[in-house]
Image: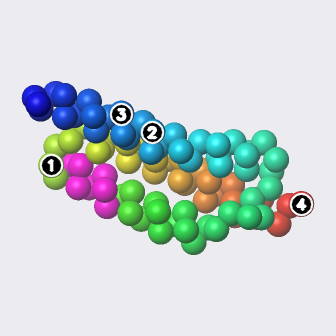
Amino acid sequence: MSGLEIEIIGLVAAVLTTFAFVPQFFKIWKKRDASGVSVSMYFIMFTGICIWFYYGVLIDSIAVMTANIASGILQLFIIVFALIHRNNR
C-alpha cells in the first residue's frame, strides 16, 4: 500500500470517529438540555484529542491532525453547551 492509500484510510476513520459526536452536539443544542451528559468524560476526551493532535503534528499526519481539530471543536462545544444547559429540563 502506498503512503497516500494509508493516509486515505486514516482520513476515512477520522471522519467516522469525528462525526460520532455530531448527534450529541445537535441533541444538546436543539433541546437545550444536557442533564445526561458527563462533562468530565468529554473533558478527558478533549485532553486526549489535544494529545492526539500533537502526535499528528509530530508524525506529520494530515489525517490525525484534521480529525483531532474537528473532534476538539465538537468536544469544546459539547462541554460548553453541557455546562450552560446542564440543569434545564
Residue to which mark 3 is pinned: 12
Q: Earlier in the sequence, mark 1 or mark 2?
A: 2
How packed is label 1: few (under 14 Cα within 10 Å), some, or many (20 or more)?
Answer: few
Q: Earlier in the sequence, mark 2 or mark 4?
A: 2
* Residue at the outermost left position: 2
Query: Label 1 is placed on what type of residue?
Result: Ile
Q: Which residues are magenta?
A: 51-57
How many numbered marks, from 0 up? 4
How packed is label 4: few (under 14 Cα within 10 Å), some, or many (20 or more)?
Answer: few
Question: Mark 3–mark 2 contact, CB under 8 Å?
Answer: yes
Q: Earlier in the sequence, mark 4 or mark 3?
A: 3
The alpha-carbon separation of the residues under discs 4 and 3 comes to 37 Å
x and y percentages locating residue 32 in the rendered image: 80, 51
Residue to which mark 4 is pinned: 89
Query: Label 4 is placed on what type of residue?
Result: Arg
Q: Main secondary structure of the magenta part?
A: helix
